[in-house]
Image (tube, rainbow, N blue to C red):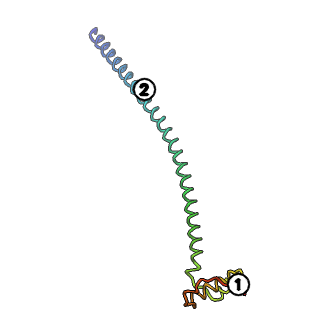
Amino acid sequence: MVDEKVILEKIIRINRNTVSGIHERFNKIDFEIGRRVAVIEINTDSLVKTLDTLGKELREQYYSLGRRIDLLEMQVIKYQNEQGLNNTQVTSKGILSMIENLENEERWNLLNEMYDFYYNKDESIKGIPLDLDY
């Protein structure tokens, strides 16, 4: 019976040492993992802040680009509208209406240019200013 008691005590001691070793390893692993998790959390927070900042900058650039595109579209439309008069056929009534809106001197200059362009074949007198006082 003494032998059984000694054997049982040895088994209990070995089990206690094994359990104690397991607890020590577990605590060591838990500490190491906890430390790594803390580092990961810190890095994650830093990444979140960086991504927020980059997101704000990207959003600002996107809106700025949108405004620039809108401005370019307006300039293209304005240019097309300015060029539209040259690309479309205008009726004689429309031309007369435009001529009526001109000042007297502008009207005479326009008529002079039209005459020179369409009817005046004498190159020596083309472009001579009109005498508006006659």
Say what amino acid the circle numbered 2 marks.
Phe
* Residue 124 x, y percent position in the rendering: 56, 86
Q: Which residue is mark 1?
A: 132
Q: Earlier in the sequence, mark 2 or mark 1?
A: 2
Which residue is found at the position 32% from the left and 12% from the top? 9
Which residue is found at the position 56% from the left and 74% from the top? 80
Q: Quadrant of the C terminus?
A: bottom right
* Residue 78 x, y percent position in the rendering: 59, 71
Q: Nearer the viewer, residue 62 or 13?
A: 62
Q: How many marks?
A: 2
Say what amino acid the circle numbered 1 marks.
Leu
Q: Give the answer, above or below, for where 109 lies relative to 34.
A: below
Q: Quadrant of the N terminus?
A: top left
Q: Quadrant of residue 104?
A: bottom right
* Residue 94 x, y percent position in the rendering: 65, 85
Q: Give the number of the disc on residue 12.
A: none
Q: Which residue is mark 2?
A: 31
Which residue is found at the position 42% from the left and 27% from the top? 30
* Residue 48 x, y percent position in the rendering: 50, 42
Residue pushed farthest right? 133
- Side (left or right) of 74 relative to 9: right
Q: Give the answer, above or below, for where 62 lies relative to 96.
A: above
Q: Secondary structure at mark 2?
A: helix
- Side (left or right) of 103 relative to 3: right
Residue pushed farthest front? 124
Which residue is found at the position 70% from the left and 81% from the top? 105
Q: Nearer the viewer, residue 89 or 38?
A: 89
Q: Secondary structure at mark 1?
A: loop
Q: State the CA–CA distance, disc 2 to disc 1.
A: 102 Å
Q: Give the answer, above or below, for where 66 lies relative to 105.
A: above
